[in-house]
Image (cartoon, rainbow, N blue to C red):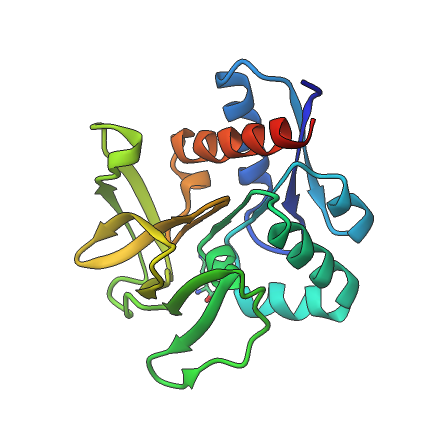
Amino acid sequence: MNELKIGILGIQGDIEENINSTKESITNLNLKGTVISVRHPEEIKNLDGLILPGGESTVIGNLISLNGQIFQTIKNRISNGMPVMGTCAGLIMLSKKVYDKFIGQTKQQLLGVLDIVVERNAFGRQHNSFETNLKIPTLGPVPFKGVFIRAPIITNVQDNVDIMCSFDNKIVAVIQDHIIATSFHPELSLDTRIHELFVKKVIDFKKSYN
Ligand code: GLN
């Protein structure tokens, strides 16, 4: 198999941290690959997988919609099976519908490929940012340190979406086929297990067309 080529959407947010976690995951899995920050449709067309980092979803959404081509290329590639992972703002970008407790449904640009409803900034002021140990059965018995920063929660999922993790009765991570999404930031926890799960999806996808 050729080297994997994974892109991190390089518009805004914690791009560098995702590059590092993905590179480390590739090494841990004994694979070869390149991980690059991407912001042009041509680059996205050549990827085997894409990560949408945490940051500010309204900013990322506005900036990618300025160039309709990048927006459409990402959407098409995901619809055609390319694995994608979204963390925090990235989860928001992937979702079908987003609302805010105070202002109701937001009018922000969404890719709309993940069949979930999301509430933005759902942990309130006291819990703007926090860390907690999460139980994630898919990853085995060792807890995963969840880093939450003005995090969203998932308030509704369709039947085709698997719940990967709940915390405090709130859904905070899901998988829908080749799409992984987390409310928290795995790229900030020095634990690469979720990025490794994503890289494994990228391998499966690459095998399917090689
Ligand atoms: N609150 C941000 C948003 O709604 C997400 C925060 C984050 O990515 N850490 O876009």
In which quadrant will I find the C terminus?
A: top right
User: Would you identify the image quadrant in which residue 47 lies?
Assistant: top right
Q: Residue 4's spot in the image, x, y percent?
A: 66, 27
Question: Looking at this rendering, what residue extends furthest in the left direction?
Answer: 168
Residue drawn at (38%, 68%), measured in percent from left and top? 118
Is residue 56 among what the camera can see? no
Percent of width and height locating residue 111: 58, 64
Residue at 25% across, 28% down: 140
166 sits to left or right of 90:
left
Screen quadrant of the N terminus: top right
Q: Is residue 117 left or right of residue 138?
A: right
Point 56% across, 68% down: residue = 110
Q: Is residue 16 left or right of residue 143?
A: right
Q: Which quarter of the figure has residue 32?
A: top right
Describe residue 198's horizontal placement relative to residue 141 as left or right: right
Vertical comparison of 42 with 67: above or below: above
Q: Position of residue 43 (x, y in %)?
A: 78, 44
Above or below: residue 161 compared with residue 45: below
Q: Residue drawn at (38%, 69%), measured in percent from left and top?
A: 117
Return the residue found at the far bottom.
103
From where the camera sits, is residue 61 visible? yes
- 87, 160: nearer the viewer: 160
Q: Looking at this view, name the residue that lies furthest to the right.
A: 42
Count the marks: 0
Task: Give above or below for 174 relative to 155.
Answer: above
